[in-house]
Amino acid sequence: MKIALHRLAHTRTGDKGDVSMISVIAYRPQDYPFLAQELTPALVAAHFSALALTKIERFELPALGALNFVLHGALRGGVTRSLALDAHGKTLGHVLLALELEVEDS
Amino acid sequence: MTGGRHPGRIRIGCGAGFSGDRIEPAVELAVHGELDYLVFECLAERTIALAQRARHANPAAGSDPLLSARMRAVLGTCAEQGVRIITNMGAANPRAAAAQVADIARGLGLRGLKIAAITGDDVLEAVMAGNPPLIGLAGRVEDLGRDRIVSANAYLGAAPITRALANGAQIVITGRMADPALFLGPLVHEFGWAWDDWTRLGRGTLVGHLLECAGQVTGGYFADPGFKDVADLARLGFPFADVTLDGGCHVSKVTGSGGLVDVRTCTEQLLYEIGDPAAYLTPDVTADFSGVGFVADGPDRVLVTGGGGRPAPQDLKVSVGYLDGYVGEGQISYAGPNAVARGRLALAIVAERLKLTGAAVDDLRSELIGVDAFYAAAAEAHGQVPEVRARVAGRGKTMSAAEQIGAEVESLYTNGPAGGGGATRSAAPVMAIASVLIPRTAVSPRIHWVTA
């Protein structure tokens, strides 16, 4: 069965130039290993395929139950040049929470 | 040892996290926070370039538009309680800002207040002469176009703030400075940390990073109803940190204020706008947040553990502001049955019109927005999208080309699909920002004094 990331984690999104940073923080520490295994950079990049990312990095913070994704080229030139309604990309973190992850039936 | 109001610790509050931030929470902090320092962080990437243009037009202008309102609101209380104020509201004109604050102080009957203005972040001349390569963009500074460049400001470190405080400043006003440095400066002054004590500089930078967006660590930008509930956001309290000699701290807020400080709000803010948590670059230190932990320690009070640092980068980052064409935009809404189809037709018409008329527009963006702005409950009942708002934005080579985008959207009233309503349009020049590096040696911060 599938579970929405929104039920497992919360996010906050920031930006620097043309880079969007999205933290994904597990509500429960015991869910972190599952998130670390399943929420791969490739999966996140595929979820944001419309953004034409040039590079994606993921930093792991197990003590905080958090993953920090750094999406390069996400903001069409950055807040000062973008034509998007949300030029900062502030809404991207919650768009990420719509992602569904496969969990084993128990 | 510290000269603060609380034995063994310094209490530093944040009264603004951006230039348009609420003012009452800062007053609440000043009155009830028992602070040693109140910091206002008000300078976004682009703000200083816009302020620089204002200063070109009027030599007394170029500081933060809310400087006067904020200072009138807190100056009396801060002077009375001995709370020192640090802010980057000087923007493109810290000296004029200091003079303005002195006037306000005198108007409030406050005499003898020592105000320090810090300059030296304006490095336009050095950047034009050095023509360094752009970061993340092809080419060098000159490729942006000499006549289009408006400003170049280096991110200064905390040292001039520390120096100003050591010389008795009660108010310190800066222009471009690394945001956490506004907090690190007073901590170095109070605790006497060495400028190569990387661990403590890293921790002091962590304090600044957690506080610098004000309400974002006290429950602002956090609520997600049913998942992360926050009480009383309309009366959100702003944060303070109680910092100790080793650079450790507690984060909290004034009792009775709205909002929430817990491990989750602190974790979100720790990771806000950072790349590699082990290498957060500032002019003062390469801070390491990778080992930071949070422990709940009472209601709305969190203990921050860990954090460290390594030597600071050799070069300073500079934001170069330059004019980059014009952006025009128009919006119009369609509601009721078949709204999506009419919205898409509208977008197609505008794109074709701009082509037909040869408008000097490129990089056109077209989209549909909408849920419940147009009484469209009836359509929703039929299982259709109730309404859409068609939005077209594009880059124009000239202002008139940019204006044409909104004009084409507006003309959909009588020339487009049936039932368009609520059209809006705008056009404006684009102030873009590019980043370059400059050697530290090319930057010399200065302190100017004004006494009220």
Image (spheres, coloured by chain):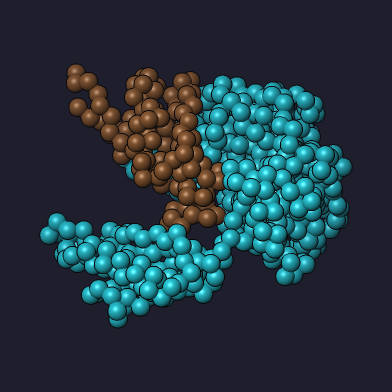
Please identify the quarter of the rendering in which residue B373 is found: bottom left
Chain with colour brown in the figure: A
Which residue of the protein is positioned furthest toward the bottom in this rendering?
A: B414
Say which residue appears at 61% left-offset and 52% top-offset.
Answer: B433
Residue B251 x %, y %: 58, 33
* On-image quarter of the N terminus of chain B: top right
The correct choice, above or below, for B340 with respect to B305 in the image is below
Residue beneath the point at 78% across and 61% down = B96
Q: Give the percent coordinates (x, y) of residue B357.
A: 41, 75
| Chain in cyan (letter) | B
Residue that extends furthest to the left in the rendered view of this protein:
B382
Of residues B10 and B247, which is closer to you in this image?
A: B247
Depth check: give the residue in front, B70 or B290: B290
Position above or below: B241 against B76: above
In the displayed structure, A30 sits above or below A20; it is: above
Quarter of the image for the C terminus of chain B: give it: bottom right
